[in-house]
Image (cartoon, rainbow, N blue to C red):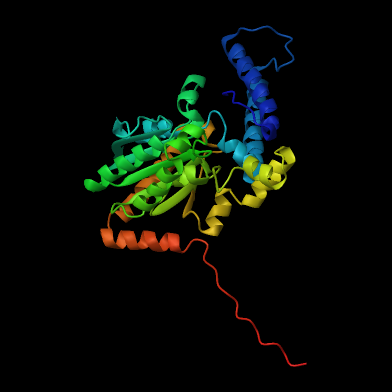
Amino acid sequence: MATYYTLEFEQPLRTLEEEIAQLKSRVDALTTGQGPTGTGLPEDLAQAEHALAERLSRHSQTMAELYKQLSPWNTVRVARHPSRPQGRDYIELMLRDFTELHGDRRSGEDPAIVTGFGRIGEFKCLVVAHHKGRNTQEKLRCHFGCPHPEGYRKALHKMQLAAKFGVPIVTLVDTPGAFPGLEAEMRGQAEAIAFNLREMSLLPVPIVSVVIGEGGSGGALGIAVADRVAMLQHAWYSVISPEGCAAILWKQANERTNSQAATALKLTARDNLELGVVDAVIDEPPGGAHRDKVLAARNLERWIVAQLESLTQLEPAELLERRYQRYRGLGSFDLAKQEAPVPG
């Protein structure tokens, strides 16, 4: 069994995984007639295989129980798992004939946002994806998934190109937020995101967006104005990170305040579905997408293809009207009629 980076709430799994690794080695040794005796492990092959099967079953049950009712704060931890598949991972697993496009034609290239044309299922499409980086050097180049203004301008330039040729757009959101540095602000960070929000609402081609990990504030919204929006099961999507919220409300971000903030923000996929912010929740493999990237990509691809099959049947005018109504409906409420006071 593969060894994973262990989150705090996953410690029971870590213990079982160590036992499973030992038992697998013992079974291999007994099968080949090699290995020392007196190891404290079963000396009989049948006993070793039975013990291994029992530990595997217990591991599956424990993992299902741990992930069945994750707290909001633990959901954030899973979404940030260092082995969780990122934008480029899904591009490699889902797309055929992918051709990456670079630059915003204004100030430069931002590796925190990946853009390019390819095929998902039978559909030619443009993919726009956040990417955090897999190793230290790549993470530094990608600013840990926090795009600069040139990233958002690059994304919009490629989306306008897709609209010109009538090609659907798929965006994969995974960012803690747009880069907050002084240089990014000087180059028009807020303006770039705001401009994207307006222009994406007017693109006359289908747009499908999925939050695959973190969906932080305007950094996520900058590529997430879409006809259909979904979240992976253990992703989060909110106006601010739990740490940022805790620092504002309680003047300190620690384990207790972060957990309280995560609960108050209603940032989980289930919460966002109930609030109508997203249209669907895409199931992840047992134990999270990091435990089976191929299955996670297959589930994601299946949902995207189903949406494109539906959206490509619509005329541009109807598509734009539905998109407009979708966002007009967010946060809607009814005013209760004030009852006349009863004469006393």
User: Is 330 left or right of 40, judged from the image as shown?
Assistant: left
Q: Taking 228 as reference, is 108 above or below it?
A: above
Give residue 114's quadrant in the image: top left
Residue 70 visible somewhere in the drawing: no
The one of 75 and 153 positioned closer to us in this rendering: 153
What residue sits 64% from the left and 15% below the top? 26
Residue at 72% x, 37% y: name it: 254
Q: Position of residue 327 (x, y in %)?
A: 44, 59
**Res 313 quadrant in image:** bottom left
Residue 73 visible? The answer is yes
In the picture provided, is 227 more to the left or to the right than 296? left
Judged from this view, the residue extending furthest toward the right is: 344
> Can you give x and y, in whole percent of width and height, for residue 277 in the image?
50, 55
Provide residue 223's location: percent of width, then percent of height: 41, 44
- How many numbered circles does the render carry? 0
Above or below for 183 versus 342: above
Task: Indicate whether 174 appears above or below 205.
Answer: above
Of all residues shown, which one is farthest toward the front?
Answer: 186
* Residue 147 percent across, percent down from the top left: 45, 35
* Left or right for 239, reference 149: right
Query: Which residue is more in the foreground, 90 or 56?
Result: 90
Q: Quadrant of residue 247?
A: top right
Quadrant assignment for the C terminus: bottom right
Q: Nearer the viewer, residue 192 or 118?
A: 192
